[in-house]
Image (tube, coloured by chain):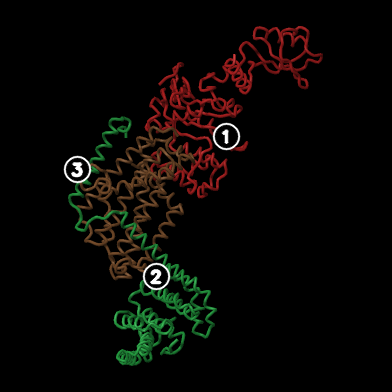
Chain colours: A red, B green, C brown
């Protein structure tokens, strides 16, 4: 299964649709409408959107937990709506729950059997995963005594039990402290290094911006934007420059060429049209200043997200 | 389990399984066990009734245990009017367990000793209706009829039933009952019966000589065998 | 089948945790011990009456256990969202339903076996008779409550516990009402096609008669497997169409 760029696809969702009947005689409520999503192998793909956008429903359709009204759902080329298609799939639900009477080890033993691990391998794999997620020494503790963060870590462990090739994480940082969030980030990056594909649904935009290669942004059941992070966030035709050493302020030669000027201490930050970069560099040099950095101008994912959703609201209301 | 994805296949399989069950059903109908199969409901109903009856009689026994210490005081020269408060409890005991002989026995005597002869007779009639084979209750009924109601013919009839058609809890009860019957017959002028009873009483005396009365019995409480007329 | 057994084992472990199972087993055992002291309703608690009350008690207790487990298992897992960890893996919904039912059947078997042992001990102590025939009655009780559990599990894939319990009790009632509903004048085909659990009710033959033959036991097993498998199948089909 290959994407447009010829890369192998780990996850393919095409024209997904989910409708719920409301009442007889009334039109059905469409919560996911014509959503398509492709995730290349070995990448981390973010799925973003406000509450009620349809992210979780889309993920659940992929996992066979919700029956799709229409659409194609494949994991490594095999339909994931049938059990065999989920053989190499791991899933961390949002706020995972476990049978309360089990210990951590017993819970993983149960799920290990479900993913087909041999009895002889389950214990070793259990201990390895508990150590990986920071729960070493907790194998005999009852799940009922776990904190929210510990349950989250255990959820990650059970998602990784079957050595999956694709991992779906729904709000993985939920309930984790900053250290835990960092660990989760490193875990995802580690999975990518090993060639595991990660589909990440999260509200933590800063986290998504750091780890994701591509994102799909959903709003009101539809795809609002999709693409590589850099392509989405980089502002086309603009360059950001940082300059120091301008003792007398910005030289006159820069008048009209620079925008969004900010100064902090001795460092000046401003944006320049790509075509004017050389002229600005020469003007700074002539004024006795020095260039600290030149890079494509980029807005934060948060700003992009907010701008996108505001536009869709205005477009809907106009 | 791909069969389940096809609706017609699922329906066909369900029908096939139903056919298997109905086939087994037909075989069992054609070859029933030698003893007729009874509905589960009947067995459950009978068992429930047995347990409810058990609960009922258990409740009666618990209630009686509350009045029993005071009841025994009756024989220890306790004032009769102090016994009156036990009557509602005793009534409840007989309602819960109509076969609770002691409750009838004591209640009728408390009532009659308080001057309520008709009421005592009603209790006695109820008692023998629910326990027709109780020698103790028949003898007591006969005694009340003779001494308090002054109805010798009916007293003799009850005494005959006690003597010839009744059962006794133990030898001690039978001995004391015969003593009571002897006094009834003597008051009615039936000396033939008196002579017969004397023989039986003498025999019982010999048989029970040296035997310890059952624990909690009147005999053990009174500390002597042989009962004086009340 | 490994996945099915893993799910069944999880059901058994969860049942061990549930106080209701222990309470029912303990209470039932105490009531069984009390049987010989019950006031008689015929000619005393003779052995036949003891067997009848003991088996009726086993049936009632097993029914409580079956309904408690079956009505709460799947709805509870869905409500607590613990089902996501299972069904997001390579586990078919039919495997999940089958595993749940098998686990309940296992628990029922253990409870009924425990009751039967207690009854045998009481019988041996009170009447000097180990009453091995009680196991024939126990088989009937186990098979019937397994069918009821299958029905309850199937219904629980769609509705909540209270509706499951009410529906299951209605099912038991109807399944034992063939004679009352059809009457002796009904055509034979109606008798043959009316689904009934009467073949599984062997309390009377075991208690008051000579028990059941091996062939009859085979018929009972056929009836139980047919109905139970049908309900598990229907439950699986219904569950496949449910959004979680």
Mark 2 crowdedness (10 Å alpha carbons): few <14, some 14-19, many ≥20: some
Determine if residue A214 is in view.
no
Q: Is residue A227 above or below residue C118?
A: above
What is the quadrant of residue B204 in the picture? bottom left
- On the picture, is A160 further left or further right than C108? right
- Say if mark 2 contacts mark 1, CB within 8 Å: no
Residue indicated by mark 1: A173
Q: CA distance from mark 3 to mark 1?
A: 68 Å
Q: CA distance from mark 3 to mark 2?
A: 48 Å
Q: Position of residue C205 (x, y in %)?
A: 24, 58
Q: Tag on residue B98?
A: 2
Q: Nearer the viewer, mark 2 or mark 1?
A: 2
Instruction: Quarter of the image for the C terminus of chain C: give it.
Output: top left
Relative depth, front residue between B201 and C188: B201
Chain letter of mark 3 equals: C
Please, what secondary structure does the residue beneath circle 3 have?
A: loop
Q: Position of residue C12 (x, y in %)?
A: 40, 49
Mark 1 crowdedness (10 Å alpha carbons): few <14, some 14-19, many ≥20: many
Residue indicated by mark 3: C187
Q: Nearer the viewer, mark 3 or mark 2?
A: 2
- On the picture, is A213 further left or further right than B198? right
Instruction: Quarter of the image for the N terminus of chain C: give it.
Output: top left
Q: Are marks 2 and 1 in one subunit?
A: no
Chain letter of mark 2 equals: B
Please, what secondary structure does the residue beneath circle 1 have?
A: loop
Chain letter of mark 1 equals: A
Q: Is residue A236 above or below residue B83?
A: above
Q: Tag on residue B189?
A: none
Q: Position of residue B43 (x, y in %)?
A: 31, 57
Q: Position of residue A118 (x, y in %)?
A: 38, 42
């Amino acid at each position: 299964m290959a994407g447009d760029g010829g890369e192998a696809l780990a996850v393919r969702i095409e024209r997904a649709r989910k409708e719920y009947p409301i009442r007889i005689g009334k039109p059905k409520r469409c919560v996911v409408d014509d959503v398509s999503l492709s995730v290349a192998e070995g990448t981390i793909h973010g799925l973003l959107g406000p509450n009620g956008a349809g992210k979780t429903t889309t993920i659940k359709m992929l996992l066979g937990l919700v029956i799709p009204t229409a659409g194609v759902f494949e994991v490594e080329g095999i339909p994931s709506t049938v059990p065999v298609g989920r053989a190499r799939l791991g899933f961390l639900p949002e706020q995972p729950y476990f049978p309360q009477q089990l210990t951590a080890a017993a819970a993983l033993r149960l799920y290990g059997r479900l993913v087909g691990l041999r009895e002889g391998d389950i214990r070793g794999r259990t201990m390895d995963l508990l150590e990986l997620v920071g729960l070493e020494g907790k194998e005999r503790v009852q799940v009922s005594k776990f904190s929210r963060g510990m349950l989250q870590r255990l959820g990650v462990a059970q998602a990784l039990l079957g050595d999956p090739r694709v991992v779906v994480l729904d709000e993985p940082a939920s309930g984790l402290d900053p250290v835990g969030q960092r660990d989760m980030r490193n875990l995802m990056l580690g999975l990518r290094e090993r060639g595991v594909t990660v589909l990440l649904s999260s509200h933590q935009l800063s986290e998504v911006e750091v780890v994701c290669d591509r994102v799909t942004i959903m709003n009101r059941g539809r795809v609002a934007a999709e693409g590589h992070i850099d392509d989405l966030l980089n502002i086309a035709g603009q360059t950001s420059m940082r300059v120091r050493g301008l003792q007398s302020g910005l030289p006159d030669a820069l008048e009209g060429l620079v925008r969004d000027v900010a100064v902090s201490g001795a460092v000046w930050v401003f944006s320049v049209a790509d075509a004017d970069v050389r002229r600005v560099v020469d003007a700074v040099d002539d004024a006795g200043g020095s260039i600290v950095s030149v890079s494509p101008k980029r807005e934060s994912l948060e700003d992009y997200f907010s701008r996108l959703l505001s536009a869709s609201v205005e477009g809907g209301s106009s | 389990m791909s069969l389940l994805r096809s609706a017609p296949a699922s329906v066909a399989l369900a029908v096939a399984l139903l056919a298997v069950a109905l086939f087994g059903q037909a075989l069992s109908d054609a070859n029933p066990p030698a003893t007729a199969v009874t509905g589960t409901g009947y067995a459950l109903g009978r068992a429930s009734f047995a347990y409810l009856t058990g609960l009922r009689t258990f409740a009666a026994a618990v209630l009686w245990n509350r009045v029993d210490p005071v009841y025994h005081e009756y024989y220890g020269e306790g004032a009769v009017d102090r016994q009156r408060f036990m009557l509602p409890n005793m009534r409840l005991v007989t309602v819960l367990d109509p076969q609770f002989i002691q409750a009838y026995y004591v209640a009728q005597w408390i009532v009659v000793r308080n001057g309520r002869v008709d009421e005592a007779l009603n209790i006695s009639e109820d008692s023998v209706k629910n326990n027709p084979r109780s020698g103790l209750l028949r003898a007591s009924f006969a005694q009340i009829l003779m001494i308090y109601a002054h109805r010798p013919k009916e007293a003799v009839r009850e005494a005959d039933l006690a003597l010839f058609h009744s059962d006794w809890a133990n030898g001690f009860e039978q001995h004391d009952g015969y003593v009571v019957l002897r006094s009834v017959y003597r008051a009615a002028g039936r000396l033939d019966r008196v002579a017969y009873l004397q023989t039986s009483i003498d025999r019982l005396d010999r048989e029970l000589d040296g035997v310890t009365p059952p624990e909690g019995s009147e005999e053990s409480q009174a500390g002597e065998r042989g009962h004086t007329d009340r | 089948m490994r996945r099915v057994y893993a799910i069944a084992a999880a059901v058994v472990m969860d049942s061990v945790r549930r106080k209701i199972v222990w309470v029912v087993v303990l209470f039932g055992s105490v009531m069984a011990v009390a049987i010989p002291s019950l006031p008689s309703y015929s000619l005393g608690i003779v052995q036949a009456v003891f067997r009848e009350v003991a088996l009726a008690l086993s049936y009632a207790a097993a029914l409580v256990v079956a309904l408690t487990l079956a009505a709460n298992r799947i709805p509870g897992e869905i409500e607590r969202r613990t089902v996501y960890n299972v069904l997001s893996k390579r586990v078919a919904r039919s495997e999940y339903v089958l595993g749940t039912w098998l686990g309940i059947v296992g628990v029922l078997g253990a409870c009924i076996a425990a009751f039967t042992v207690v009854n045998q001990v009481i019988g041996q102590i009170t009447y000097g008779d180990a009453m091995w025939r009680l196991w024939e009655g126990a088989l009937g009780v186990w098979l019937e409550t397994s069918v009821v559990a299958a029905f309850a599990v199937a219904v629980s894939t769609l509705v909540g516990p209270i509706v499951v319990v009410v529906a299951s009790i209605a099912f038991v009632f109807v399944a034992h009402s063939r004679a009352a509903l059809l009457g002796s004048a009904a055509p034979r085909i109606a008798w043959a096609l009316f689904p009934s659990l009467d073949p599984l009710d062997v309390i009377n033959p075991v208690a008051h008669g000579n028990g059941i033959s091996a062939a009859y036991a085979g018929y009972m097993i056929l009836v139980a497997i047919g109905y139970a498998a049908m309900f598990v199948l229907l439950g699986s089909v219904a569950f496949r169409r449910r959004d979680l």
